[in-house]
Image: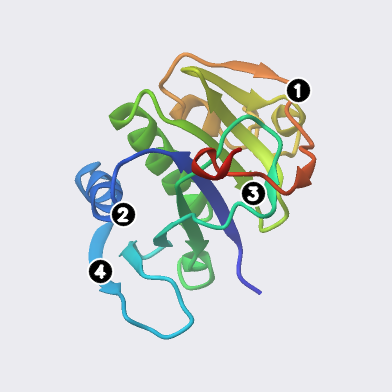
């Protein structure tokens, strides 16, 4: 079973522009060839490092979205490649690269609404709406994702932010603005 953190953005930036931001951020990602033209599968752009594989795709299906005020146009999936199984000195590389990648994207697209969900479980980790960045208070508790005593991932969040209750979000059908009546 893979471990993924899903980052959703409301941005006009293309998949390639998002991938290029991650590659230029200096956090270890290299561009990989796009996967396009596959029947019944979306086109996607890719990047990877030894610890993390990234796929970027257009988010067009708004039939089941969280009610958090962000209607995403792109989804950036950070996949744990489990480097730590071969190199025990890298236990946090995946989470660190996820946070660094998210920060690089938020810096580059400051007006983009966005949210981050963890572990394929729709656990709210972060929400940016109207340039206001919120980290999940629930996930800032001991032993959780943002726990500053265990994994100082909060120190990698280099944008002004607050730690407040975040989610769980109710999921349901959402009409895209172009489809609104």
Residue 4 position in % (x across, y down): 58, 59
Looking at the image, is mark 2 or mark 4 earlier in the sequence? 2
Residue drawn 32% across the image and 81% down it: 37
Viewer-proximal residue among 79 and 152: 79
Closer to the camera: disc 1 or disc 2? 2
Relative placement, left or right, of 140 versus 27 is: right
Residue drawn 55% across the image and 32% down it: 152
* Circle 2/circle 3 CB separation < 8 Å: no
Residue drawn 30% across the image and 46% down it: 27
> Which label number is shown at residue 118?
3
> Which label number is shown at residue 165?
1
SS for callout 1: loop
SS for callout 3: strand
Residue 54 position in % (x across, y down): 40, 60
Residue 77 position in % (x across, y down): 49, 57
> Which label number is shown at residue 32?
4
* Alpha carbon distance from label 2 to label 4: 12 Å
Asked if 123 appears above or below 94 in the picture, the reply is above
Residue linked to disc 2? 15
* Alpha carbon distance from label 1 to label 2: 31 Å
Residue drawn 51% across the image and 35% down it: 114
């Amino acid at each position: 079973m893979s471990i993924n953190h899903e980052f959703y953005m409301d941005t006009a930036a293309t998949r390639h522009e998002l991938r290029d931001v991650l590659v230029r951020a200096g956090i270890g990602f290299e561009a990989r060839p796009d996967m396009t033209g596959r029947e019944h599968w979306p086109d996607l752009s890719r990047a990877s490092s030894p610890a993390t594989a990234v796929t970027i795709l257009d988010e067009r299906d708004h039939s089941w979205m969280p009610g958090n005020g962000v209607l995403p146009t792109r989804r950036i999936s950070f996949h744990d490649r489990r480097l730590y199984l071969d190199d025990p000195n890298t236990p946090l590389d995946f989470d660190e690269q996820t946070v660094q990648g998210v920060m690089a994207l938020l810096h580059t697209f400051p007006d983009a609404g966005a949210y981050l969900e963890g572990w394929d479980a729709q656990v709210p980790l972060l929400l940016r709406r109207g340039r206001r960045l919120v980290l999940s208070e629930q996930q800032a508790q001991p032993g959780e994702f943002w726990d500053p005593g265990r994994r100082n991932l909060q120190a990698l969040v280099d944008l002004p932010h607050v730690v407040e209750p975040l989610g769980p979000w109710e999921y349901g059908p959402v009409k895209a603005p172009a489809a609104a009546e």
